[in-house]
Image: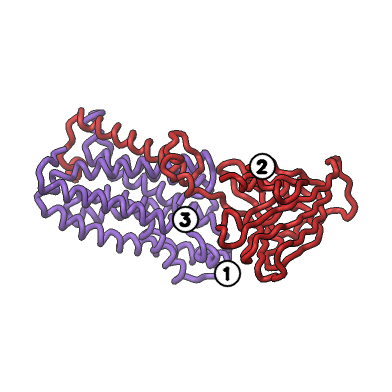
Amino acid sequence: MTMGTGVTWPRFAGFAAGLLLLAWAGAATAHNIGGTDAAFVAATRGPDPIPFMYLGAKHMVTGYDHLLFLVGVIFFLFRLRQVALYVSLFSLGHSITLLAGVFFDIHADPHLVDAVIGLSVVYKAFENLGGFRTLFGVQPDPRAAVLGFGLIHGFGLATKLQALNLNPQGLLVNLVSFNVGVEIGQILALGLILAAMTVWRRTPSFALMAAGANVLLMLAGFVLAGQQVAGYIFGGAVS
Amino acid sequence: MNPSEQTGRPMAKGRLILATLGALGLATLIVLGVILPAEFNRDPLGVGRLSGLSRLWAPDDKTVDADAGGVARSREYDIPFRTDVVEIPLGDFMAGADRSELEYKVRMRKDATLTYAWEVIGTREPRDFHFDQHGHTTPAPGQPMTVSTYRQGFGLQQRGALTAPFDGIQGWQFSNSSEKPVVVRLRLAGFYELIPSGEPGNEAGIVANVPAPQSRPEAARP
């Protein structure tokens, strides 16, 4: 990585610190829907769209694994149309599995799903580094990858909702509301990420630090996957 | 749109391999050295113990209602019957928490019963003495702990019977906040085992069936 000059190092360190803070804040606010929110969901009978929308948005905004994946996805998307296309593919993917998973009661182990979500961050960062072409000589279609990982992320969302005692009364309305909330939260988070990325891209240091940032994304993805594998093996809660 | 449009300048091959393996290696170190000790009570690298991260871990508590699980009023046990008199000296509140409060428990099997009576000698003021009668399991690392609280309050004596709601350790946290050292005289009878000195439930190292001056050898040491 070319970060040898005095200008880029502090900025790189700042970015790294920001990324770590993001992950830490996410861990502190917990990735599962818990505490009073869980009690609320368990007590709900019948349709209650606004609170479920809020829960969906909250889960997305505090779900650092989803956010890191989004950072990876839009990292090298310079045109707004491309951003819209990729994010729509991601939304399509996770909406399908979120709705289908909860509605048809398809169960998957939350730890394993979250581990794959961590690996999706690694995949995207590796792709951003041109890794597939450089090492294997092929470039899998990134659109298909985003759609496919969208499906996995949706399963992750579904397992969080399934962990709560959802009442069958008003399930469809509440589920769709949660999904709408997820999309709202995603747009909010995306707006912030895009704004920060746009500012960053205008600086001359972007080209120099882009590779390093993606290596850091890869590291974060490996750690996320590792802690979920640990949760799968040893049991117990992982934030 | 050409898929390759979206990637940036590709990384050189050697650097890419190094960066990927480096990220994987560092992530493994973080998970094994930091996350496992802090979140799962496993410490494969020993970093948790050295850094104090292991102390962050605490088992999830599962609270059990002490009245739950009815058992037959008449029961027989294949466990030996025993009686003990335990004299527990406690320092005055100025002596510090190490001296003025401690936990004394015995090990009991589920549904085993003991009868108890204890009194505080050395003060007449009930507000000076607090007790917390409770029991919990001693889970393996990573497993949740089942806890049950029976009574918390101030007072100089308590008499009663206890039937253990689960396999585990049952007993009291005693705290003396008077200006004088006191002795708790605890009498037990029933189906239980004493906990060896230094183990969970008897960390203070109380020795049963000896007078108070000899019952707390750990505290006598400088």
Disc 2 marks which amino acid? Ser
In the rendered image, the vertical position of residue A26 relative to residue A224, given as above or below: below
Callout 3–callout 2 Cβ contact below 8 Å: no
Task: Give the alpha-carbon distance from disc 3 to disc 1, as whole Å.
Answer: 21 Å
In front: label 2 or label 1: 2
Q: Quadrant of the C terminus of chain B?
A: top right
Q: Which residue is mark 1?
A: A45
Determine the CA span between mark 3 and mark 2.
41 Å
Residue closer to the observer: A66 or A177: A66
Horizontal and vertical percent for residue B118?
77, 59
Q: Are marks 2 and 1 on the same chain?
A: no
Q: Secondary structure at mark 3?
A: loop
Residue count near mark 3 (Cα–Cα under 10 Å), binned few <14, some 14–19, many ≥20:
many
Q: Is residue A169 above or below residue B75?
A: below
Q: What chain is the purple one?
A: A
From the image, tell me which residue sits under label 2: B197
Q: Amino acid at mark 3?
A: Asn
- Residue A53 appears at what percent x and percent y? 42, 67
Residue mark closest to the camera, 3 vs 2: 2
Which mark is in front, 3 or 1? 3
Nearest the eye: A190 or B72 = B72
Sort mark 1 into few (<14), some (14-19) or many (20+) by Cα contacts within 10 Å.
few
As measured in the structure, the alpha-carbon distance from the residue carrying label 2 to the one carrying label 1 is 53 Å
How is colour applied across the structure in the image? Answer: by chain
Q: Is residue B37 above or below residue B92?
A: above
Chain letter for mark 1, please.
A
